[in-house]
Image (tube, helix red, strand yellow):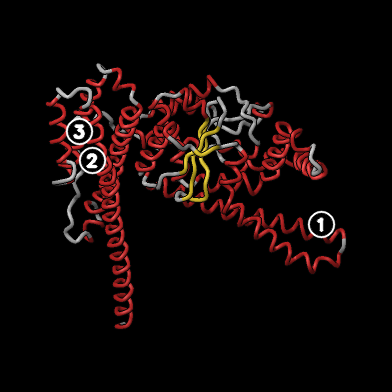
Amino acid sequence: MERRSFHDEQSRNKRDSILLAIVVSAVLFALIVSISYLFDPSSVAIMVPLGIMFTGIYTWSSYQYGDKVVLMSTNAQPAEGNKYIYLNDTVEGLAIAAGIPKPDVYVMPSMELNAYATGKDPENASIAVTQGLLDTLDRQELEGVIAHEISHIRNKDVQFMTLVAVLVGIAGILSHMILRSWRFGGKRRSDKNNGSIDVLILGIGFLLAIFAPILSRLVQMAVSRSREYLADASAAEMTRYPDGLADALEKLGKHNRGDMKVSESVSHMFISDPNKTALDALYSTHPPIEERVKRLREM
Amino acid sequence: MIWTIVGAAVVIGGALVLIYVNYYNKIQTLSNRIEEAWAQIDVQLQKRYDLLPNLVNTVKGYASHEKEIFEGIANARAGMVTGSRQARVEADNMVSQMMGRLFAVAEAYPDLKAQENFKLLQEQLEGMENKIAYARQFYNDTVLDFNNVVTTIPGVWFAGGRGKEDFLEIPDEARTAPKVEF
């Protein structure tokens, strides 16, 4: 029965992705045309084909390069070399168990315990884990977390989740990246004569930051929490050891303070909420860890 | 009247052909997937086969008197690439057990243990052991899917006499499948 259910999940994600692309393209196109109409009614004749072209390119490149944007925005570096043999082996083993090609593996420098998967389909997918996760979890716990991410890839959750993050949340991702580079490296660049360009980019960063929270809320509303429970269950099936993931989740809950400072537009992709905000009390982006652990322990 | 009967026969015949094609393709696809799953195991067995002499030679430099273990590994290693699938997987399991003893021996030689090359080999070989276990699991999952189709109605009518495929069994498998409900 479980095999059937992951095929169902795949077609649900495919359908959701297409629906999302259509809705976002339509809204964007309507916005472009109506704004240009307000400024100059005669410009509509040019803006309709231009708008179609723009929304088409925007949607296509979000699908095509969304994973690269997400990886860049979370500061993920490729996991290469002898230091990461063990991580790469674990990912490869579980990819074999799931019957998918081995995803690319990335490491984020944070000491929080977290991980996510992204990609446009199971053949072009990536998994990113934090350095803290590698340092803290034991073998079975790490296998549990990786199996959870592999399940997201096999179920095609990553396709939909990446598309949502980039298509809807791009303003949040961009403003986050711009403001971060300004905070950490602004001084050394602005003493050159391209200072005015820096100011312009920074201005765009602040402008986008105004829209970011609204769009991020839309992102989170689009992503249902049932995907997390399903990926947990698939991970347990794959590793034949539900307690591995349950132990890992308990460690995540105990250890993490939620200060990874990633854009809210991508926070739904992580296995545990990377940012703790005041809004969490009203609407949490992640199902409660206690409930997930309880379900795993009962398997 | 006659045309009604002819029409009904054509519709029913067409439906039967469609059902046949559907099940024929399903059975072929699953059968191909079993071969794919075996190829995954084969790749890992081959890699391990190639890497083992490096490990043995490295340890030999320090503990040349452990002849019994070296011979055990050599014998089991030869079985990894010949014989039936079941026999090859069992040979690999034997290699894992002998390797466990080899690593236990290595504990007594701090110089050997500290060697970068040895550590790397140990990590790689153990990683392959894990991958083989997962590849075997995927193989057995696929065989189960195949067997479910060819032994139940209506699949069994279209299987053309194809019987069940064998699982790859490892006697002392510690992992058992948990019950998963969605």
Tag on residue B49?
A: 2
For the N terminus of chain A, the image quarter is top left
The secondary structure type at the circle numbered 1 is helix
Calculate the distance from the C-alpha at mark 1 to the C-alpha at mark 2: 67 Å
| Marked residue chain, label 1 | A
The residue lying furthest to the bottom in this view is: B2
Identify the secondary structure beneath mark 3: helix
Q: Residue at x 64, y 28 (%)?
A: A280
Q: For marks 3 and 2, give the CA distance.
A: 10 Å
B22 or B169, nearer to the observer: B169
Q: Position of residue B155 (x, y in %)?
A: 25, 57
The answer to whether residue A2 is visible is: no
Q: Is residue A72 above or below residue A131?
A: below
**Dot 1 crowding, Cα within 10 Å, few <14, some 14–19, many 20+:** few
Which amino acid, mark 2?
Tyr
**Along the viewing direction, whichever of B28 and A86 lies nearer the viewer:** A86
Mark 3 vs 2, N-terminal side? 2
Residue beneath label 1, please? A35
User: Are there few (<14), some (14-19), or many (20+) residues within 10 Å of tag 3?
Assistant: many
- Vertical order, B81 against A184 (above or below): below
Residue B163 point in image, percent of width and height: 17, 53
Q: Amino acid at mark 1?
A: Ile
Residue under the image location 22 percent in, 56 percent down: B156
- Tell me, yes or no, whether the two marked residues, 1 and 3, touch with CB atoms within 8 Å: no
Q: Quadrant of residue A176?
A: top right
The picture places residue A141, in percent across and down from the top left corner, at: 42, 27
Q: Are marks 1 and 2 in contact (CB under 8 Å)?
A: no
Q: Residue at x 28, y 46 (%)?
A: B43
In the drawing, does residue A181 fall left or right of residue B2?
Answer: right
Name the amino acid, label 3: Val
Camera-side mark, 1 or 3: 3
